[in-house]
Amino acid sequence: MKLTYKTDYLQLIHPFTISSNSRTFTPIVFITLESDGLIGFGEASLPPYLPDNQENVIEFLQSLNLQKFHLETPVENVLDYIFRVEPDHFPAKAALDMALYDLYGKKENKPLYKIFNSLPDLMPETSCTIGIDSEEIIKQKVEELERFCVLKVKLGTEEDKNIIQTIRKITNKPIYIDANQGWKTSKEALEKIEWLYDQNIVMIEQPMPKNMILDQQWLHERSPLPLIADEDCQGIQDIEGLNGRYSGFNIKLMKCGGLREAQQMIELGREASFKIMIGCMNESSCAVMAAATLAPKADWVDLDGPFLIQNNPFEDPEIKNGKIVLKDSPGIGLTLRKG
Ligand code: MG
């Protein structure tokens, strides 16, 4: 297998502001894995608040010897090797995992959703995100997102009520709230959640800073809305600790290291009666369409990456009735954008 990689930057349509930071682009490393004339695509997304960056992704990729593997090697064996080389490096591992499955799907002539036994008929609607912004821009964004049936709204500042009231003047679509750790005490969080309860809100993602174990438990016992862990749940190792603190968790390929890990998180989560959300970072169609193959197994889907950027190198996912359409073409089903 031949590995190539290339750094790039996804340019955002609007500056993306959450409770802790704001940015206009997101660094990316795109990869390809090539074997027997077939090419698999992968992507590592590297938001600046995470420990990984383009340099350490490339260092990790350079430390691998993938030449010894070929198309006939089971994906499991290649992934076992990649995960053994070094701990962490989850965005790089996610890129390799999706490229391997893309390649394998092309070899088997099967779309990934069939390889993962997902049922396209069960695909939930995907939300699309509105970051923290001025009233005017928020109004504009709500209008731009007309084809989405669910909105995800970033909160976690003094402006929370104003933001929701601005949106509610225009639409009563269901809203997923993401506080991104922005509410600093359990009392503040509960007050906000009780106010939000009457605003057609579906759930609340990561209300308080991660690792606030006892406060999170206190909040979970009192919250009238389900609480979903994001920053508090990076991968399989964190699931057990969510018991009694959250109703569910948000799985992202960049946090857990790819589709194989995500599939295991879904299985473990279901056994423990957790709600499952599948989300993304700022990502192109590559990582988002890979994640979408597991989305029919989730309760909630937030796969909006390609719709927030200007320079997606692949064609955008198709949206029908507010849902991402899973392609029947082999692998992830990506088409490079022309020109
Ligand atoms: Mg989140």
Image (spheres, rainbow, N blue to C red):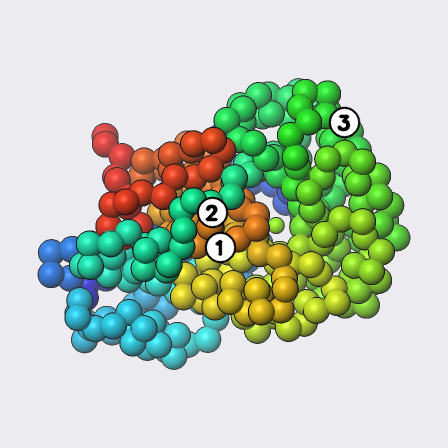
Query: Quick check: 109 left or right of 333?
Result: left
Q: Secondary structure at mark 3?
A: helix
Circle 1 sits on which residue? 297
Query: As rendered, which of 258 and 91 lies closer to the eye?
Result: 258
> Is residue 135 placed above or below 184 in the rendered structure?
above
Circle 2 Cα neighbour tier, 10 Å, few/some/many (<14 / 14–19 / ≥20): few
Q: Percent x, y for residue 334?
A: 28, 44
**Which residue is denoted by mark 2 in the rendering?**
122
Q: Give the distance between the C-alpha atoms of the residues marked 1 and 3, in whole angstroms.
A: 33 Å
Toward the viewer: 216 or 308?
216
Q: Are marks 1 and 3 in contact (CB under 8 Å)?
A: no
* Whether label 2 touches label 3, CB < 8 Å: no
Which residue is rendered at x = 46% and y = 75% of the image? 87
| The image quarter in which residue 200 lies | top right
Q: Is residue 162 visible?
A: yes
Neighbourhood count class around disc 1 (C-alpha, 10 Å): few under 14, some 14–19, many 20 upward: many
Q: Nearer the viewer, mark 1 or mark 2?
A: 2
What's the amino acid at mark 1? Lys
User: Are the residues tagged 1 and 2 within 8 Å (C-beta)?
Assistant: yes
User: Which of these two is toward me, 268 or 260?
Assistant: 268
Residue at 50 percent of width and 49 percent of height: 280
Q: Residue 103, can we see it? A: no
**Amino acid carrying mark 2 in the image:** Leu
Q: Residue at x 55, y 36 (%)?
A: 128
Residue 165 shows which numbered tag? 3
